[in-house]
Every structure is written in structure tokens, then in C-alpha cells.
Image: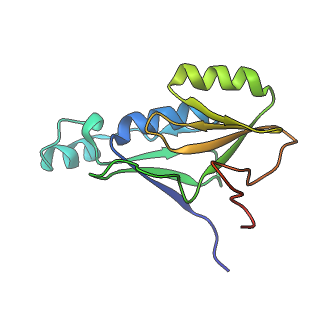
Amino acid sequence: MAQLHDLVIDCRHPASQARFWAALLDGYAVAPYDEEELRRLSAMGLSGPEDDPTVLVEGPDGAPRIFFVKVPEPKLVKNRVHLDVRAADLEAERERLLGLGARETGRHENWIVMADPEGNEFCLQPAGGGQPGGQVGGGPVAGA
């Protein structure tokens, strides 16, 4: 049986996306760069972590890692997969995420549809409540 190991998110600027998601998710942080990794970037002609085409965000033990991978094309349509995140105080977390660069794109009875700085949708739900797999855009995502 397969197990979820990593999430990989295509984006235009991995470093800024990684910082956003590390700040959004409790217990997550951008993986540190050691000297070997910095030498690898230099050998690729990159000036440092800000130009890294693949940035890793790590969470608590056992949590999936998240890789942000640079792609040349912009996001054009609704995500086919989105993340659901939960918070104890939905409105306070909404405000915090807006301050990080997210934007609200929709509101439903039990959750708020948000987008990260590059437009990738995610749902903000109340901890211990809300409907998992909520609607993003026009129709149900889970169970469709």
C-alpha cells in the first residue's frame, strides 16, 4: 500500500513560496542550506538559495515534506489538487495569512477559500469542524 511521502508544488519562485508555506503551517520550516548545498547551487551558476529551482520545506517527524519546484509557465486555471488547512480561530488565521500575502477568493458556510501569493488555492477550515475536501471554485473537490 502506498503512503504519502512528499508534496511537490510547481511555482514561479520557489524560495518565496517556500517561505509563505513554512510560515502558514505550524511546525514547518524551510530546510537549511549547508555548505555542500550552497556549492551545488554555485556550480549551477546560481547566486544562492533565493535562486534555487527546488526548495524544500520540512515539518514535524512523520509529516510530508513539501518541495517547491520552479516551472516556466504561470498558473492559469484552478488547481486540480488543493490543501485543506485548519485553524482554531478561522478569522484570526485568515488575517494572519492575508498579512503573509495570501488572498481570500471565496467563502462557504464552514470554510474560506484562499490563494497563496502565486494563486494556488487552499481551504482554511475551523479546527475540529468544517467539511474536508471543501469546494474550491465551482464544484466539490472530494468525492467528485
- Quadrant including the C terminus: bottom right
Residue 68 spot, x, y in % from top left: 41, 48
The vertical placement of 73 against 97, above or below, is: below
> Who is closer to the viewer here, 15 or 73?
73
- Give the colour scheme of this rendering: rainbow
Q: Is residue 108 left or right of residue 28?
A: right
Callout count: 0
Write the residue at 26% across / 47% down: 36
The vertical placement of 17 against 143, above or below, is: above
Q: Is residue 61 left or right of residue 12?
A: right
- Quadrant including the N terminus: bottom right
Residue 137 spot, x, y in % from top left: 63, 48
Residue 96 spot, x, y in % from top left: 63, 21
Residue 109 lies in what quarter of the image? top right
> Who is closer to the viewer here, 119 or 21?
119
Write the residue at 40% across / 49% down: 75
Write the residue at 77% across / 28% down: 90
Write the residue at 41% across / 50% down: 76
Residue 125 spot, x, y in % from top left: 76, 39
Q: Is residue 54 left or right of residue 102?
A: left
Outermost residue toward the bottom in this view = 1
Outermost residue toward the right in this view = 128
